[in-house]
Image (tube, rainbow, N blue to C red):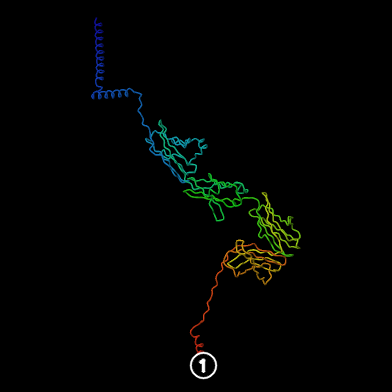
Amino acid sequence: MELRLCLVLALAIGCFVKCSEARHSVARRSNDVNYVDDEAGDDLLADAASDDDTQNDAEGGDEEEEVEDAIIITQSTNYSVDLGSNVRLACQVSPSVGVVVQWRRGTVKYFLGTMKPTEQLLQTYGIDERFSIAPNSTDLLIRDVQPDDSGVYSCEILQENLPSIHHRVAVLESPRIREFIATDNGRVTEGADLVLTCDVTGSPPPKIVWSRDGPNGNERLHERDGEFFNNSVLIRNVNRQHTGKYYCYAFNPIGSNQAEVNVHVKGKPRVHVHRTVVNSAVNVEAVLQCAVHDDSDVRIRWYKDGQLVSNTGAYAVVSAGSRSNLTVIPESDAHFGTYTCEAENDLGKHNRSIDLVQSPVVENLDADGPKLSWTIHSHQPLRQIEIQLRQAGGEGEWRTITVPLPEERRHVYNQVYLLEDVESGKYEATVRVQNDKSWSHSDSALFDIEVQPELIQHASVYRGGSDSLRPTMLALTTLIYLLVRM
């Protein structure tokens, strides 16, 4: 009986406790709703939230604290670096703890934190020990900067938003001409195209000026001389005038450099003769000379009236390089006539002729005012010399003036003659000369003659000082005295 009474009491007490907790819970929910807009209620909610947070922390809740993203403080910069010096590319981050910085150039990754690239990257991209991370920093250090180090370097933080900066490095280098070449090593054929190429390095990229040695010294090449593109110049359809030395001048703000190349334009030979007419006589030696311009690889031959001349009898041929002399000792009139010097190379032939004559050769006719001068070559005695003169323009009659013969006999005569009774004006003149064989004449020449007026001294009744009057006056006085006495 007593046992039953104790059980009933325990149940009653437990029911009371449960009912009290239920009422308390309802009362709390009723209070939360009522203080949502109340300032005090906000405080209570804040307190309740604090209590809940504290409880959760105490109970070991799994919510993580939010971490702030890192940023890069350094700004993107342009670096100008002298060749061979060191450069430090800054990349300061905040916060600096717990972040991983990566350096790269394009798609090539240089460093991940302080980890160096793999050996494969080192070999593939040529990254060497000159690249490193500066101690106690996230800066990239490049030692002994080389030309290929120019470019854009990126520093970035490996996190979700991936912030980055980009540094541009320009290596300053004085111009360096690695090679200056011409088409076919500078030996081109006449009519072909010539290309000059100047391979230049430097930073900033150098500018190029082209020039060549010309008749007036070193002359710059312009657009009329060729076509310019990249580091080359194209000269079309070259001729012998393009032969010479060409220059490439490269310069930038750091310095300058230059190189040169020789160009030889090869074409058909060009024969030049010193004199086109040579005077000689039987048994008198004459030397005929010819030269080939700008071509050493040439074959030279002599012909007499179309027949090949060899080293026999009256002839002796001496050739050396681009020059040749034919010595003739005429044995009879048959050895006089037209001789031809012919030059030949792989591109063609060219020739010039020389007349070997016994008639006089008159040359170098010139005028200095009314004074004419000329030269006569003749191994035979001179018989007559004449000047033919008329007004310029082909109008009017020729006036023939006979010139006295030289007193001495020579082979070369340098003549000078002063024209008289001529007025100032423009004249045409030629000189005709005869020797024992025949007549010949000079080329006609045009020139101006200015006749200077002669100074005329007027006559005077009296000359001298006052002393010269005394003898005359004395004689006059004596004559008057005698007349009076008579």
In the rendered image, which quarter contains the N terminus? top left
Q: Which residue is mark 1?
A: 483
Q: Is residue 44 left or right of residue 356?
A: left
Check disc 1 and report its element: helix, strand or loop.
Answer: helix
Q: Is residue 121 left or right of residue 344?
A: left
Residue 426 is situated, as x and y percent measured from the top left of the image, at: 58, 64
> From what the image shows, is residue 432 above or below residue 292?
below
Kind of residue at badge 1: Leu
Task: Work out whether residue 410 or residue 178 is closer to the camera in this orientation and state it.
Answer: 410
Q: Is residue 330 left or right of residue 445?
A: right
Residue 164 is situated, as x and y percent measured from the top left of the image, at: 41, 35
Determine which quarter of the picture holds residue 351: bottom right
Task: Work out whether residue 364 or residue 134 is closer to the camera in this orientation and state it.
Answer: 364
Residue 321 is situated, as x and y percent measured from the top left of the image, at: 67, 55
Residue 186 is situated, as x and y percent measured from the top left of the image, at: 60, 49
Mark 1 neighbour density, 10 Å: few (under 14) some (14–19) many (20 or more): few
- Name the residue: 51% across, 87% down: 472
